[in-house]
């Protein structure tokens, strides 16, 4: 796809703002078809599927925010002139064609596309079948905005492929792909990494941990745990595991207090062997593999640790490397935790629910990357470019 100037890209986005507002009711009605066809056995997936007036407002806000951001393409990173008078300029450049695979969440059809397009990338959207009607009308809105401004619909395209066809497309793409972003479970991610013929940027699972130090302010700890667990169970930044230091003053009393508070919010509590001696009526885990699980439900596993080092080791072994938090009034301890926990975002005395592009000031996000190459954390507009060297000479040859 050719390099577009900022003005034409912003005109497309301005058109999209008007179209989304005009089609607001039609978008919500299309979404109702998806909701009515969905079996609610997976509450988290159902929650992600919902598009209401608030969600349309958020889509519009995402498009407007990206429209107002600086164009990330063509920015000078370095500029050097060598002794032989070669001028070497490193600049930001588009990836080319991005494929994103996701389920539920029709808002991804807006956020992923607006970011990719503003960064001058073509994007292929592979949404889940559960959101088909919602995604179709949103694709139609995009195509109208593009064509109204003299651009090809190919810039933003929904892949109408079944699961098996998607797998075949990954193995043998019918067009060049430069980057694939799988947003889904371990099975999808592993399949993409195995069969992709281009770069893969993983938007990994959550399975986020929180450690309560013996130096914690207990009131802060309880408030953060409740928020991180119950605010939005379908979020990849929701809390799944809590580790509590056994040396916390009034440890047993506080564990029982936490149990009572969680039960008020209808949270199912699982416990490890050590905590089960204090909360004997709670289900004790029988298989350590559960420490690897992302629950996406009102469920929380509470475990006991003896030290900061044990907490760090446990988190690094089992977590999804997404977000982790420590509750402590000891700043040196907090920094030790934050330096040594291997997660995209680490927190001191705060909820993991802030790992989000909008909350972190990035704006709309394509995904939360748990990879270490290129970028980690929210993938915003400035992260959807790569780099390119422009070398200016006057007949120089290497000797």
Image: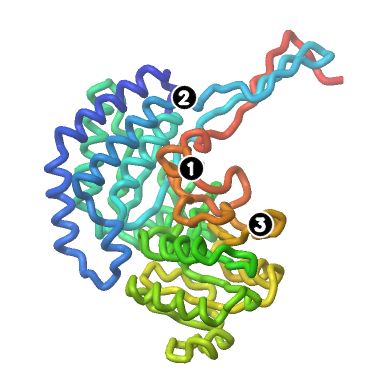
Q: Observer-nearest residue: 35 or 197?
A: 35
Q: Observer-nearest residue: 3 or 40?
A: 40
Going 30% across and 45% down the picture, which residue do you hit?
158
Mark 1 vs 3, N-terminal side: 3
Quick check: 296 left or right of 203?
left
Going 54% across and 63% down the picture, which residue do you hit?
320
Going 48% across and 76% down the picture, which residue do you hit?
301
User: Which label sits in the foreground, 2 or 1?
Assistant: 1
* Residue most extreme to the top: 394
Would you name the residue on which mark 1 appears? 360
Would you name the residue on which mark 3 appears? 334
Of the 4 image quadrants, the one containing the N terminus is: top left
Q: Determine the CA span between mark 1 and mark 3.
A: 20 Å
> How many marks can you see?
3
Dot 3 lies on which element? helix
Q: Residues within 10 Å of mark 1 (few under 14, many from 20)?
A: few
Question: From the viewer's perspective, is residue 106 above or below residue 281?
Answer: above
Quick check: 123 left or right of 151?
right
Q: Residues within 10 Å of mark 2 (few under 14, many from 20)?
A: some
Mark 2 vs 1, N-terminal side: 2
Dot 2 lies on which element? loop
Give residue 236's quadrant in the image: bottom left
Residue 369 visible: yes
Of the 4 image quadrants, the one containing the C terminus is: top right
Mark 3 vs 2, N-terminal side: 2
Q: Observer-nearest residue: 390 or 173?
A: 390
Would you name the residue on which mark 2 appears? 71
Q: Determine the CA span between mark 2 and mark 1.
A: 19 Å
* Residue most extreme to the right: 399
Question: From the viewer's perspective, is residue 239 above or below residue 6?
Answer: below
């Amino acid at each position: 796809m050719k390099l577009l100037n900022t003005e034409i890209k912003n005109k497309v986005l301005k058109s999209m703002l008007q179209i989304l507002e005009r089609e607001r009711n039609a978008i919500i009605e299309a979404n109702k078809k998806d909701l009515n066809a969905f079996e609610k056995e997976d509450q988290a997936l159902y929650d992600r599927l919902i598009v209401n007036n608030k969600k349309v407002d958020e889509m519009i806000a995402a498009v407007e925010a990206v429209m107002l951001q600086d164009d990330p393409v063509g920015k000078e990173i370095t500029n050097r002139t060598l002794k032989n008078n070669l001028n070497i300029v490193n600049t930001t450049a588009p990836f080319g064609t991005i494929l994103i695979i996701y389920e539920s969440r029709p808002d991804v059809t807006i956020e992923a596309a607006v970011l990719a397009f503003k960064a001058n990338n073509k994007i292929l959207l592979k949404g889940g079948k559960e959101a088909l009607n919602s995604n179709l009308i949103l694709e139609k809105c995009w195509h109208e905005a593009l064509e109204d401004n003299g651009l090809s619909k190919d810039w933003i395209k929904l892949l109408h492929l079944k699961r098996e066809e998607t797998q075949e497309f990954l193995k043998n793409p019918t067009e060049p792909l430069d980057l694939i972003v799988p947003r889904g479970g371990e099975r999808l991610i592993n399949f993409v990494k195995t069969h992709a013929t281009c770069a893969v940027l993983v938007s990994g699972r959550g399975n986020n941990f929180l450690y309560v130090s013996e130096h914690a302010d207990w009131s802060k700890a309880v408030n953060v745990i409740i928020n991180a667990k119950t605010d939005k169970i379908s979020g990849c930044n929701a809390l799944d595991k809590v580790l509590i230091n056994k040396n916390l003053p009034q440890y047993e009393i506080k564990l029982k207090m936490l149990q009572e508070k969680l039960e008020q919010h209808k949270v199912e509590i699982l416990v490890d062997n050590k905590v089960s001696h204090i909360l004997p009526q709670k289900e004790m885990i029988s298989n350590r593999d559960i420490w690897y699980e992302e629950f996406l439900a009102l469920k929380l596993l509470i475990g006991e640790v003896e030290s900061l080092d044990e907490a760090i080791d446990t988190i690094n072994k089992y977590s999804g490397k997404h977000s982790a938090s420590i509750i402590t009034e000891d700043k040196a301890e907090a920094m030790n935790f934050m330096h040594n926990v291997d997660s995209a975002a680490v927190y001191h005395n705060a909820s993991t629910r802030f790992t989000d592009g909008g909350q972190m000031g990035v704006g709309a996000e394509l995904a939360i990357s748990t990879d270490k190459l290129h970028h980690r954390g929210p993938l915003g507009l400035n992260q959807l470019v790569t780099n390119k060297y422009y070398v200016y000479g006057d007949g120089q040859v290497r000797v």
